[in-house]
Amino acid sequence: MPGHDIIVIGSSAGGLKALGAIVGTLPTDIDAAIFIVQHVPADKPSILPKILADVGSLPASHPSDGEPIQKGRIYVAPPDYHLLLNEGSVRVVHGPKENRFRPAIDSLSCSASKTHIVWYNMIISR
């Protein structure tokens, strides 16, 4: 994939409403792949991909390790696994926790910055 066609989003456990608002506005023909990490309990199943697919127009899933990256899809880190990017594929790994979390947005951000050109835009809300 060229170096500018990914969107990386991280949220804490309370970020579901914000994620829904973002995903709900994404166009069906978006020329990017979206990667989302949300802090979720390791011992609970995650229905986040279904929720995001229901509020938006893009398919969402917990990817498999080594799955090829496709534009127009949302990849969600599964509980207790980091979501990482390689050139052209997704890694789903049970590595060490970062800042007490797995999955961690730090892991995704670092791997994205190594494999893609990254533009950072921070939104702070209260």
Image: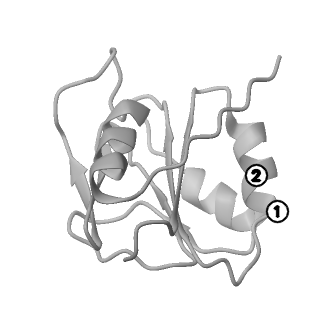
Q: How many residues crowd mark 2 within 10 Å: few (<14), some (14–19), many (20+)? A: some
| Image disc number at residue 91 | none
Amino acid type, callout 1:
Thr
- At x 33%, y 15%, the residue is 100
SS label for mark 1: loop
| Residue at x 25% of width, y 53% of height | 92
Q: In terms of image quadrants, where is residue 90?
A: bottom left
The kind of residue tagged 2 is: Ile
How far across and down, in percent of the image, does residue 51 sit?
Answer: 67, 56
Name the residue located 29 percent from the left edge and 58 percent from the top edge: 115
Residue 41 located left or right of residue 120: left
Rendering coords of residue 56 (x, y %): 75, 66
Q: Residue visible at 46% across and 50% down?
A: 118
Query: Vertically, is 100 above or below 3?
Result: above
Label 1 belongs to which residue?
Answer: 25
Crowding at dot 1, Cα within 10 Å, few <14 / some 14-19 / many 20+, comes out as: few
The image quadrant of residue 82 is top left
User: Which element is circle 2 on?
Assistant: helix
Horizontally, residue 96 falls left or right of residue 67, namely left
Splitting the image into 4 quarters, where does residue 117 fall? bottom left
Q: Residue 11, image x and y in percent?
A: 58, 33
Q: Are marks 2 and 1 in contact (CB under 8 Å)?
A: yes
With respect to residue 37, does 85 lie above or below? below
Percent coordinates x, y for residue 47 in the rendering: 56, 51
What residue is pinned by disc 2? 22
Horizontal relation, residue 25 to residue 48: left or right: right
**Image coloring type:** one colour
Q: Is residue 43 visible?
A: no
Label 2 – label 1 distance at C-alpha: 6 Å
Q: Which quadrant: the N terminus? A: bottom left
